[in-house]
Amino acid sequence: MRIASVGGGPAGLYFAISMKLRMPDAQIEIFERNKPGDTFGWGVVFSDQTMANLRANDPASAVTMEAELAHWDDIDVHVNGTKVTSTGHGFIGIGRKRLLNILQDRCAELGVIQHFEVEVDPTLEAYKDFDLVIASDGLNSRIRAMREATFKVDIDMRPNKFVWLGTHQLFDAFKFIFVETEHGWVWAHAYRFDSNTSTFIVECQPDTFAAWGFGEMSQEETCRVCEAIFADHLGGHPLMTNSGHVRGSAWINFPRVLCHQWYDGNLILLGDAAHTAHYSIGSGTKLAFEDAIKLAQVLADSDLPLADGLRQYQDERHVEVLKLQSAAKNSMGWFEEVDRYLHFDPLQFTYALLTRSQRVSHENLRLRDPAWLAQLEKAFAEKACGHALEKPVPPIFTPFRLRGMELANRVTVSPMAMYSAGDGVPNDFHLVHYGARALGGAGLVFTEMTCVSPEGRITPGCTGLYSDEAEAAWQRIVSFVHTSSASKIALQLGHSGAKGSTRLGWDAIDAPLEQGNWPLIAASAVPWSTANQAPREMTRGDMDLVRDQFVAATVRAARAGFDMVEFHAAHGYLLSSFITPVLNRRTDEYGGSLENRLRYPLEVFRAMRAVWPAERPMSVRISATDWIGEGGMTARDAVEVARAFRDAGADLIDVSTGQTTREARPVYGRMYQTPFADLIRNELDVPVMAVGNIFEVDHVNSILASGRADLCALGRPHLIDPAWTLRAAAELGSDAAPVPLPYRNGFDQLSRNLARAHGQAVLPV
C-alpha cells in the first residue's frame, strides 16, 4: 500500500509510525510545507494516560519522549491575590519542536520517506499515484477547505482572544493566573515543557482585548504589555514569541472545527483537519495520537476494502471525538464567561475551574486530592450552615434556606405527572407516592403540576386544587410529610393551555381525548400539534378568570400547609404560551416584545405573591430555551425572564428548557440543562434549581460545589428509588441525611456494606 500523509504534524507523523509498525512493507511518504526544524507555538501538554497509550503503541518513541518530558501533578490557581493548589492531576509537557523531531527521527528509522518545504496540493493531483491520502494539514487544512460540502464542515470561531507565548520562567505546576487590569480580566495558562522554557498562553474576552488595543500591537509590544500584567508571576523573565509567520498581532481566535464526514474516496482527514479541541483541556495532541493509532489499527487489522475500512475508522472514532469535543466546549465556554465566577471565593472558583469540562467530577477530585476536596467541602458546608464545623459535609447534604423555609439538603423530587387523580382530587396513591419520597430523605418534594381549574388539567387524571375535596386531600398529604419526615413539600400550580384535554400519559402522549374533550384557551390560537384541537385566544375576561383561579388555588395551598408554591411558566403550558414567541402571536399589549409577553404571567404571579404568606417562598419554573435558535426563546431571553420574576418576588428560579414546540431540537446529555441554571444564577445572583438528566450523587455534588445551582431536581431516579437521597448518604459514608428512625437499621447496614466494599471506614451504629 502506498500512503501519502499531507502534513507533518503529530497526527501525520504518528500515523506513519503506527502504520509502519503494523505493515512494514507499506510505502509511506510525508509531505510537509515547513523545514524539519521549524515549528510555531511552544510546548504541548497531555495526560499520563495518553503517555501510557503511546508507550503501548510504540515503546521506542515513548522512551525517547519520557526522557525529556516535564511532569507535574499540581495545578495552581492564582486569583484575587490568593494561590490555591490542587494535586494529583498527572500532566506532562514537551516542546512542540522537540516532539516533532522525535517523531521525525522515528519515522526515518522505520523507513518513512519525508519531504520538507513542499506546499500542500489541495487538488490532490500531486498524490494521484497513492492508494490512500491522509489530510493531516492542520486546523486550517487547505484540503478540507476545498471540500467543505463533502466533509460537512462546521467551523465555529470562538469570541475570546489568545496569544501563544513562551518564557524562561520555570513553573513547578500547571498555572492558571487571573489578573484584573484597568481594562478587564486577563489570564494565563502556563506550564513548563523543558528544562528552561515554559508555555505562557494569554487569554481575554473581546471587550478587554479591544480596550487594551492588543489588535494594533506588534508581537513585541504584546509581549511587553503582558510582562507588565503578569510581572508578579514571571520573576523578571521576559515573554517571547516565535510566531515568525505572523505579520503584526499574533492574537487569534480559536476555531472549533467539526466535520460530520471524515473521508471521501481514498482521502481521509486526520487530527486537527477533522476536528479541534480547545487548548484549555490540552487534548489536541491527544486526539492526533489517538486518531493515528486507531486508523493504523483499522487499516492493518481489517480485510475490508479501503472504503469500508475508512467508514469503520470514522464510526469508531467519531463518538470518542465528540465526547472530548463536548468536554472541550464546556471548558472553552467556562473561560468565555469566566467573569461570571470571579466573585466566588478562591476555593470555589478553583473547584469550578477544575470541574469546568465535566470530565473531572467531585469524586474524581476526591481520588486525586482528598485533603483539598475535604477543605472545599468544609468551607462550603460552613457557609451553608453559618457556623464552624468539625468535619467536612458533602455539598448535597448541606442545608439551604429560602425565606422561612430551611431544607435539610439540596435534593429535590421533580414535579412529575402521575395521571392518577379523580376529578383533580389526589388519593391514597398520591399519599403513598409523595410520602415515600419524603421518607426517602429528599430535602424538598414537589407535587406534579396541579391545575387551577378542571379546564386547566392536562388529562382527566391530573391533580387540581380547585375544590374543597382536593384541598382536604392535599392537606392530608402535607400533614404526613411534615409529621413523618424532615422533608418540605412544594405545590406546583399550573394551567395546561393548548396542551390540555389529552389522554393519560401512558395511553398516548399529547393525544386528544377520544371523547369528553373540553375547550382550550392559550395566549394565541396555536395548536400544540396538528392532532390537537386548536385553543381559543384568551380575551381579557379569560385572563381575569384564570388569574383569579391561580389566586384561589394559592389561598387553598396556604391553608393546606404547603411550604412553597411554584408558578409553572414553562413547557408550553398556558403561562409559557405567553412568554415564548413560538406560541404567542398576539398583536396587543400582551404580544410582540418580551416585555409585553411577560405582562400577563407577571400579573398572575404578583397576584399569587400578594396572597401567599410572606414567610413562605415562591419559585417559578421557566423554559430557558425553545431549542430552535434565534426564532424562539434564547438563553439571554431567559436571563431577562428570570430577572423579571425575581424582581416580582420569586425566591427561586426552576430552570428547565423546551417542550414549547414540536420543532425543538434539544442537545441531550448528562446535566444538559444545568448551563442555563448556571447562567441565570451567576448573572442575576438569584437562587436556582437545576434539572435535566441529573441522576448521580456525583452530578449533584459537582453542580452545587461549582456554584452552578443551589438545588438539584431529580425526577426519574426518584420514580424507581424513592430513597435515592438515603442511598446517596450511604454511598458517601455521610451521617448527615435525615434518616427516619424506623428505617435506621436498614440505612446503617447499607452504609456498612458499601464502606466495606470500598475499603472505607465504617460509620458507627
Image (cartoon, rainbow, N blue to C red):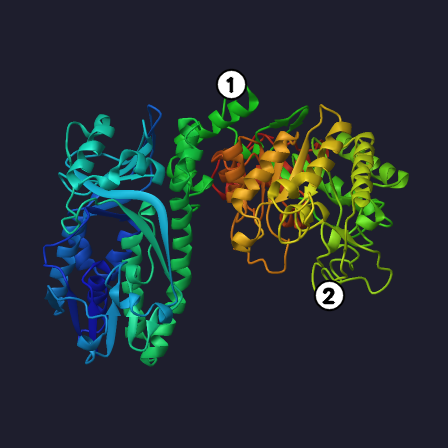
Q: Is residue 28 left or right of residue 428?
A: left
The residue positioned 41% from the left and 30% from the top of the image is 342
The residue positioned 39% from the left and 63% from the top of the image is 318
Q: Is residue 414 visible?
A: yes
Q: Quadrant of the C terminus?
A: top right
Residue 765 is tagged as none
Q: Is residue 668 visible?
A: no
Q: Residues within 10 Å of mark 2 (few under 14, many from 20)?
A: few
Q: Which image quadrant for residue 117?
A: bottom left
| Residue type highlighted by circle 2 | Ala
Residue matched to label 2: 531
The residue positioned 71% from the left and 53% from the top of the image is 524
Does the residue at mark 1 contact the one at mark 2 (Cβ under 8 Å)? no
At numbered mark 2, what does the secondary structure look like: helix, strand or loop?
A: loop
User: Residue 747, how many percent across, how many down?
Assistant: 63, 37
The residue positioned 66% from the left and 50% from the top of the image is 571
Q: Is residue 525 left or right of residue 25?
A: right
Nearest-to-viewer mark from 1 and 2? 2
Residue matched to label 1: 388
User: Residue 338, how many percent across, how many down?
Assistant: 40, 36
At numbered mark 1, what does the secondary structure look like: helix, strand or loop?
A: loop
Vertical placement of 109 versus 406: above or below? below
| 22, 531: nearer the viewer | 531
Q: Which image quadrant for residue 639?
A: top right
Question: Separation of disc 1 and disc 2 at Cα?
Answer: 59 Å
Q: Which badge, 1 or 2, is on the more N-terminal residue? A: 1
